[in-house]
Image: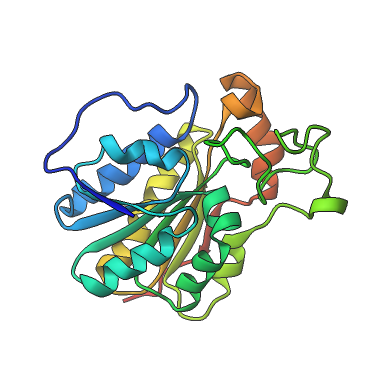
Amino acid sequence: MAVRMIPELVSRPHVFCPGCGHGIINRLIAEVIEEFGYQKKMVLTLGVGCSCNMNDNWSCDVLQTAHGRAAASATGVKVAKPELLSISYQGDGDAYVIGLAETLNAAYRNTPITVFIVNNNNFAMTGGQMSWTTMPGQVTATSPQGRDPKKTGFPIKVPEIIAGFEGVAYVARGSVHSVKEIHRLKKYIRNAIEAQINGEGYSMVEILAPCPTNWKLDVKKSIQWMEEEVVPYFKLGELRERSPR
């Protein structure tokens, strides 16, 4: 693992693909952190994937971890420095396939970290291979005839699993496919981060995002496909609300 320290705010264009949802998500998370005043009191743990592109754009200590191990590494940060805000940022392939055990164990232990998982239905960074969130019939680099649920199962819904664990503070699923949902997503992000700041326990937000490059669609058609296929399957909203304090 490599630790990268970025001592000041960095202002430069991101390097995510055109139409990708990561840029919007980065902006929302950064805004909430600034609103809470935690820019210099946090560690951002990155999984392997498109999230690696965040290394040069964040003004905080960044921990680049091994593939799938971000939740475990974020747990270590919180144990060593409980006063810090410990955030894990991963893709669906990293968190739900390579690192499913780490993702579930952190939630099952109710580790007081905040996990953001970007679900774009494929392994985006490594060439668009099928992920466990790939939709039925979806064509990927490793499912050229379309995903067949009879052979590979149906898309996994990890937030629903975690929402059923006793004690977890907050679980939600948002999306960036419309302005309305982007506004709702910021609310979910705020709740997830505030839950950690207040010592309420584990919090998680899954975020549905387009991947025009690997979906082989333009941005307009990507958003349309999300609305027609992805969002009806991966229901949006708060799956585990915070308890009144």
Q: Is residue 113 visible?
A: no
Taking the image as shown, residue 148 lies to the left or right of residue 78, namely: right
> From the viewer's perspective, is 6 left or right of 13?
left
Which image quadrant: the C terminus? bottom left
* Residue 52 picture location, percent across and down: 39, 41
Query: Residue 28 at what x, y percent from top left?
Result: 34, 41
Report the residue at 34% width, 71% height from top. Answer: 112
Number of numbered discs visible in the structure rendering: 0
As drawn, 4 above or below 17: below
Question: How far across and down, in percent of the image, does residue 202 sit?
Answer: 40, 70
- The structure residue drawn at horizontal position 46% and vertical position 55%, both measured from the top left corner, is 205
Q: Residue furthest right?
A: 150
- In the rendered view, tell whether residue 18 sits above or below residue 92: above
How is the model colour-coded? rainbow
Q: Residue at 60% across / 18% down in the picture?
A: 218
Is 121 displayed left or right of 49 in the figure? right
The quadrant of the image that shows the N terminus is: bottom left
Task: Determine whether 131 is above or below 113 in the image.
Answer: above
- Determine if residue 121 is in view: yes
Give the side of residue 240 with respect to residue 192, left or right: right
Q: Nearer the viewer, residue 10 or 159?
A: 10
Q: Nearer the viewer, residue 150 or 196?
A: 150
Residue 63's x, y, as percent? 30, 53
Q: Residue at x 50, y 73 (%)?
A: 105
